[in-house]
Image (spheres, rainbow, N blue to C red):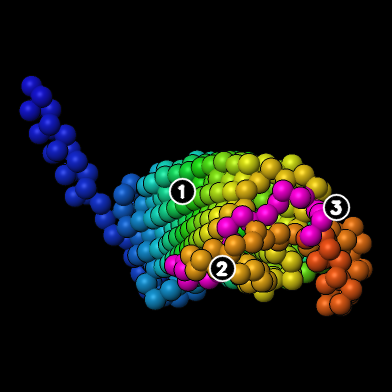
Amino acid sequence: MKFLVFILSLFLFSFNYGTANTIEVCGSCNYKTIKTAIEEASANDTILIQKGIYQEYNIHITKPLTIIGKGLPVIDGEDQGEIITIEADNVTVDGLKIINVGTSYTTDFAAVRVVKSENFLIKNLELEKLFFGIYLEKAKNGKVINNTIKGDAVEEFNSGNGVQLWYCNDVEVIGNNIKNVRDGIYLEFSDGILIKDNLSQNNLRYGLHFMFSNEDTYENNIFENNGAGVAVMFSKFITMKGNIFRKNWGTASFGLLLKEINDSEITNNKFEENTVGINIEGSNRINYTDNDFRNNGWAVKVRGACYANIFEKNNFFNNSFDISYNSKLNDNSFDRNYWSSYTGYDLNKDGIGDVPYRPVKLFSYIVNRTPETIILLRSLFIDIIDFSEKVSPVFTPDNLMDEHPLLKPVSHDIH
């Protein structure tokens, strides 16, 4: 009996698969509009869109389909509203150029929106003149791969995000190039997300911004020249590995902001030429290992309520301030890091300094309270008071020291 059921299931599957058709859309084809082709298509059909310009919007996909563009056909929404909305499982959209998404102060119009769908694939799209780029809403088990998203954001109130995930699970966002939008990648209430090999640059606010999202992984991305850098808030079990945070400059800017983040790994990243490399507040039990901090204003700025964090095998190169604290309390561990400003000695030649290193300067404490004093950064007077504070700490944490400072930088495998 089981054998007969198996044979019948195999036959039905083969029959359904065999009935899938390819529908062609072009100016001289039977189907001249994408909407009409989608309406007439059966489940699991392929719609092949030939090169050309299609002035369409509010394209709804409510059945499993594969939509492929040949020669990068253009869908021009003429600023009328949302372009493609996917409300079915097993949908692929590949190889389209979408422009002129509508702008609204009440509705988040997107070039492509995926709603309550599974097993979707959005790839090889070029999105320009947009409000929101790719918007995933209560979607799961899908992929957003190798898309180019270029906005023209000028002010936050009338611009959207490049890739947005809201209440999503188990989604991969890989190999996308995102620029000139509000936030490059934005997540909220989204768990099990993989963000990998993306370039997010020149965005109005954040290269990456997420809140209330747990067990996510951010790997081998580049976040460069964004308004305020990257913000990670109110989440736990986060892994950030092999990313580059570069040239995020400004009075309120940082490479990475961590706020209320717990039980996470920040490993093998590069923080280069940021106002603040990492700004940490209310974040606990995080391992910071094998990271490079180079030519930042502040490499690491620790604000209140940060406990049981470990900083180990990191390189601190030529930062104005390596570590900044705003109190005398310290419950974090610093061990076996390389500090370019360390001037100790190594008599037994084991590669570890014989004198512990205090990375917190008194001047950083002063600047935190009176920012205008930064103009005294290179003065001899400041060198004197920093030296006196190292000898006998009064304002900085007296137990904050690296007992085993390295004499040579740690070799890291970063881009």
- Give the residue type that dot 3 points to: Val
Please tell me in which quadrant of the rendered image residue 131 appears.
bottom right
Earlier sequence position, callout 3 versus callout 2:
2
Quick check: 319 left or right of 361? left
Numbered range of the magenta stretch: 391-415
Which residue sits at x=61%, y=55%? 403
User: From this viewpoint, is residue 184 visible?
Assistant: no
- Position in image of residue 144 (x %, y %): 46, 57
- Position in image of residue 186 (x %, y %): 61, 53
- Position in image of residue 407 (x %, y %): 55, 69
Quick check: 383 left or right of 322? right
Please tell me in which quadrant of the rendered image residue 315 appears.
bottom right
- Give the residue type that dot 1 points to: Val
Of residues 147 and 56, the one nearer the viewer is: 147
Which residue sits at x=83%, y=72%? 383
Magenta span dominant secondary structure: loop
Of residues 310 and 4, the one nearer the viewer is: 310
On-image quarter of the N terminus: top left
Of residues 111 and 225, the one nearer the viewer is: 225
Instruction: From the image, tell me which residue sits under label 1.
Output: 171
Q: CA distance from mark 2 to mark 1?
A: 49 Å
Instruction: From the image, tell me which residue sits under label 3.
Output: 394
Q: CA distance from mark 3 to mark 1?
A: 50 Å
Q: Secondary structure at mark 1?
A: loop
Instruction: From the image, tell me which residue sits under label 2.
Output: 346
